[in-house]
């Protein structure tokens, strides 16, 4: 929702779509210096990540650098978060590999073309969703489904990167296939590669867990030592480049990145290939939504810490522009990443300009530093990916979900299992479908309480949970659900059976505070209930109907046919049928 | 739900599954005579219908008779409705033709085999659903979807039968195709056939509208004249048989039924062809569910009139047995039909035995009367179908739905349009999917009311609809929806924006009588809301949480982190924050 006081004025609308007009006007030398330092730190972190995620997506490493320039600048112009850092991320890279892999083999120009097209279509979809205010669609990825999906993706990515770390070739697009491939190839481990890969892994895990306490003990401030931890991968990269170069390990079969073409990417519109775009529409949509959910969660979390506002619909436009920027500069799908945004935030990014300066840092790297990457071993990059993605794996969330709700647990578990076995698209789709089906099942058999009056009050509560006063002639029922087609007949049956089981009943009063809507199927059920109760000499009343529901009932003929009355409060209904009982209970001292 | 006092005893359970044990014990000569008369009337009505619906399903006419024997006997044993008459019906016949037509061409043994297999699989599915108590699945066909589907099927059937009525050949499996075929073949109308067809149509329409008033004027009782109206088709059949025979019209190109093989059907298990059964699984499921919905609605309506009970789960078993019986005797899918059940009821059927006697009537017809059907013109049968199905077409229901709810209207309209254009399966599936999506969309943006205290009461209501007392420091919000993933972030945004717009707010109280469930996504949103309000120095309270929701919250750590308290009544919350204001308002004379 765009909350903008000047919304009606042209400048107001323009500022809504171009937040840079807002913060750009207040920019000064202090914020400039600050943003510059932040950019330096983030660049250091982004270089290995960009290379690694490009390789994870099955693309040449330089494409990772390309995807880390234009998107950052475009996000700085259109984005509303002060801290979000946009670029290639693990899950979107995995999804890119899965989608492009269905259309071409890795290493071919068609494969690269498909990855660029994914960024383009994904960008267009995001912008369309932004203008149509369709951000709410992302809500259909429930927390358990997205958590399960990210955990499963993390496991699959980590498993796949064990190949480069151990110097073996692993094949397969699902965790299951990769695991089988691992089992079949385990004997082919390459010793020198494994030494570098596992060495990097151990170093990087130590950086995560052991470096910070050490730095603090050495007198460094907590925040700065946090940032040093994030720069750890650069140290691993420099060290292993030197080792491979000095020991000549590439001649002994250690795979290296090799020649990374230098220079800035050529800007070009990706060809408008409608047949290709249609083929990648579904994966592009899934990448867009997953990327958006990841990005907006990070943005909202960081904004809340500084009480800044993030506009969810404008974020769609900003991410869309970033992806189109990536496509035009030959890159692949990007989104706001968690780790780098936190670094951005912790280092004190004041404005989105920090992101633009980071883009300059990456550009300088592309221009001048690519020759230094020649001896970079793939095993080191794979190790950085494993360490990064393992932080995404959160199996404890399963336990948490189990404790809170079996339905949420089931959605999460099914998402994880289907993603690992069948792949990422089926996993996501199964998770969303199951969440919806479980919701429908639950609402199809709603909780119904027989309510009675709490002595000393005019309040009515479930007689199984509270000490209440009831009367054998009055059956007061509270249905805890909106009345709609999946539960319409259930409620009909429930009331029929309740009346059959309580022969003295002369009045049925439906207390409706929990009924948020009535559809046509439920209306017809209410009419049937009214008619059947009438045949049995029982009067049917309603109480506590909410305004919008009452408006709806007034558009039908139900209220004319209703044998009883509609009361504002349940107490009024009981008081009108049994005035003495209701009053006596009201006056009872609690 | 099976409500049976002896449920725990073996005899009780047996009586639940074999209702015949219950009514059979009380059977006597009076009910016998009565049931016999009813059977005679229903047989007269069922003969033309059975022949016509078999032809509608693309099957030889005798198969219609086969499908009207065993199912009636089996329903008499297993069914719980006293009035339901089971047999071939229009919509199920159309669905059978559509499903079998995809596997073989009409007139081949494979086509008949597919129709028989549909009855078998449908029967097995219904029995499985009955034992697994899955009758609620039928509820997902909402009233607007089923009404739209039946209307569209009626239109399509009527359009298709215009072919035989006019003596032209129409092709196509959807209304659209049939209409195009009609347009292309209109010039080929066969005059003699048209004379018989249109003549029958006019006669049958007159029987429906003009005969009853005439009979009543002639002194006949209303109920008896109603029954005479239903027997009208038999008169048309006899008359046109005589006309065709006497005038030798069949030599002039009037299509006739021809030789109908006499004798009872041979009983045989349909071959267990797993490949075929899997192919027809989805159509068989749709036929089962649509048939069940039609049948149970009729059964419930008629039972309510005599205050009898119908057991929805046992009805699944009875319909399943009827379909298996139909398959074993070489018939096609059957269900409880509306018109014939009403005749059964009006004629005074006392027990399901009336159905069994009708089966005997059909058997006698099959044994002795089939030679008389030789000259029966197809045009007459087509005319009886048109007159029967046009009563299913109810376009006024669209207007009714439009007035009550745009969502229900959309579901009905889309079901009609897709069924007419794309066919019956896509129509049904689109209708169900749209109903679910519209529900999800609606609940994703719930109604939220700012509430205040109604003077003179402890009741709180929407401040836009009632004269209420509010306080600038307290923001009381009532969310009219369960909190779950599609609306979790909407609510987060809403509360953030409300607080931003009301700077004086120090307490936010969520009144929760309409919240029937909280899932993990919503729990995380509540935690985020609590944290953000806390950062802004605002206390977050909850009131009127229902028992099951409170149980759920207690399984999380949310209540420990909540900055405010949970109150049983909203009044208690306000009274605890602003005791004087609450008490003063409570004591205000209304």
Image (cartoon, coloured by chain):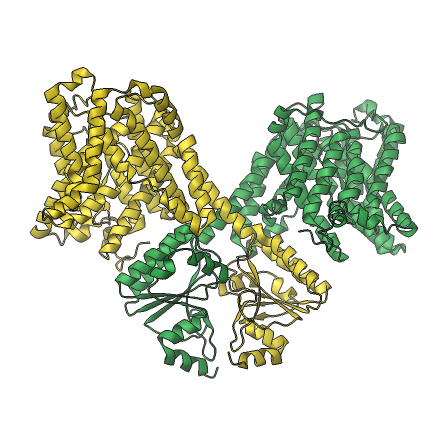
Chain colours: A yellow, B green
Q: Is residue B326 above or below residue A142?
A: above
**Taking A218 as reference, is B520 left or right?**
right
Q: Is residue B405 above or below residue A542?
A: above
Residue A286 visible, this orientation: yes
Image x and y of residue A585, in percent:
57, 78
Image x and y of residue A330, in percent:
23, 29
Q: Is residue B480 above or below residue A420?
A: below
Q: Nearer the viewer, residue A134 or A192?
A: A192
Q: Is residue B224 above or below residue A412?
A: below
Q: Nearer the viewer, residue B209 or A532?
A: A532
Q: Residue at x 40, y 53 (%)?
A: B522
Q: Residue at x 47, y 48 (%)?
A: A406
As drawn, the residue found furthest toward the top would be A251
Q: Residue at x 75, y 30 (%)?
A: B328
Q: Residue at x 71, y 45 (%)?
A: B315
To which quarter of the image does residue B134 belong? Answer: top right
């Amino acid at each position: 929702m765009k909350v903008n006081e000047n919304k009606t004025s042209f400048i107001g609308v323009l500022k809504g779509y171009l937040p840079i007009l807002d913060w750009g006007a207040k920019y000064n030398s202090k914020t400039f210096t600050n943003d510059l330092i932040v950019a330096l730190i983030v660049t250091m972190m982004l270089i290995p990540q960009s290379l690694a995620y490009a390789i994870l997506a099955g693309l040449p490493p330089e494409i990772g650098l390309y995807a880390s320039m234009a998107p950052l600048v475009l996000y700085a112009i259109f984005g509303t978060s002060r801290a979000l850092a946009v670029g290639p991320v693990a899950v979107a890279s995995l999804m890119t590999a899965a989608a492009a892999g269905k259309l071409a083999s890795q290493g071919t120009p068609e494969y690269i073309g498909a990855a660029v097209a994914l960024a383009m279509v994904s960008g267009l979809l995001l912008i369309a969703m932004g203008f149509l205010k369709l951000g709410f669609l992302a809500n259909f990825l429930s927390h358990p489904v997205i958590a399960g999906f990210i955990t499963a993706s993390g496991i699959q990515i980590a498993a796949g990167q064990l190949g480069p770390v151990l110097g073996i070739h692993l094949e397969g697009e699902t965790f299951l296939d990769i695991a089988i491939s691992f089992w079949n190839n385990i004997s082919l481990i390459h010793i020198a590669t494994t030494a570098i890969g596992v060495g990097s892994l151990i170093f990087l895990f130590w950086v995560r867990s052991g470096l910070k306490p050490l730095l603090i003990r050495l007198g460094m401030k907590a925040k700065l030592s946090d940032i040093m931890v994030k720069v750890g991968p650069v140290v691993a990269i420099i060290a292993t480049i030197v080792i491979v170069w000095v020991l000549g390990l590439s001649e002994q079969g250690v795979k290296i990145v090799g020649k990374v073409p230098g220079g800035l990417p050529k800007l070009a519109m990706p060809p408008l290939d409608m047949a290709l775009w249609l083929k990648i529409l579904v994966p592009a949509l899934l990448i867009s939504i997953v990327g958006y959910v990841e990005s907006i969660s990070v943005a909202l979390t960081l904004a809340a810490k500084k009480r800044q506002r993030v506009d969810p619909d404008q974020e769609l436009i900003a991410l869309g522009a970033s992806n189109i920027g990536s496509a035009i500069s030959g890159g692949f799908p990007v989104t706001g990443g968690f780790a780098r945004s936190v670094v951005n935030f912790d280092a004190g990014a004041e404005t989105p300009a920090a992101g633009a300066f980071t883009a300059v840092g990456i550009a300088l790297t592309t221009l001048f530093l690519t020759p230094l990457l020649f001896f970079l071993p793939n095993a080191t990059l794979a190790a950085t990916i494993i360490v990064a993605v393992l932080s995404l794996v959160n199996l404890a969330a399963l336990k948490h979900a189990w404790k809170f709700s079996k339905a949420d647990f089931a959605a999460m578990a099914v998402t994880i299992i289907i993603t690992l076995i069948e792949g990422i698209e089926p996993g996501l789709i199964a998770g969303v479908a199951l969440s919806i089906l479980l919701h429908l099942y639950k609402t199809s058999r709603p909780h119904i309480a027989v309510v009675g009056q709490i002595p000393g009050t005019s309040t009515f509560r479930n007689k199984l949970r509270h000490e209440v006063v009831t009367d054998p002639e009055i059956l007061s029922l509270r249905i805890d659900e909106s009345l709609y087609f999946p539960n319409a007949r259930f409620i009909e049956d429930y009331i029929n059976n309740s009346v059959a089981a309580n022969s003295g009943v002369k009045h049925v009063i439906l207390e409706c505070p929990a009924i948020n809507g009535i559809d046509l199927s439920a209306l017809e059920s209410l009419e049937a209930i009214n008619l059947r109760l009438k045949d049995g000499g029982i009067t049917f009343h309603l109480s506590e109907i909410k305004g919008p529901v009452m408006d709806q009932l007034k558009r039908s003929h139900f209220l004319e046919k209703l044998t009883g009355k509609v009361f504002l409060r349940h107490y009024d209904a009981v008081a009108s049928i049994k005035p003495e009982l209701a009053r006596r209970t009201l006056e009872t001292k609690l």
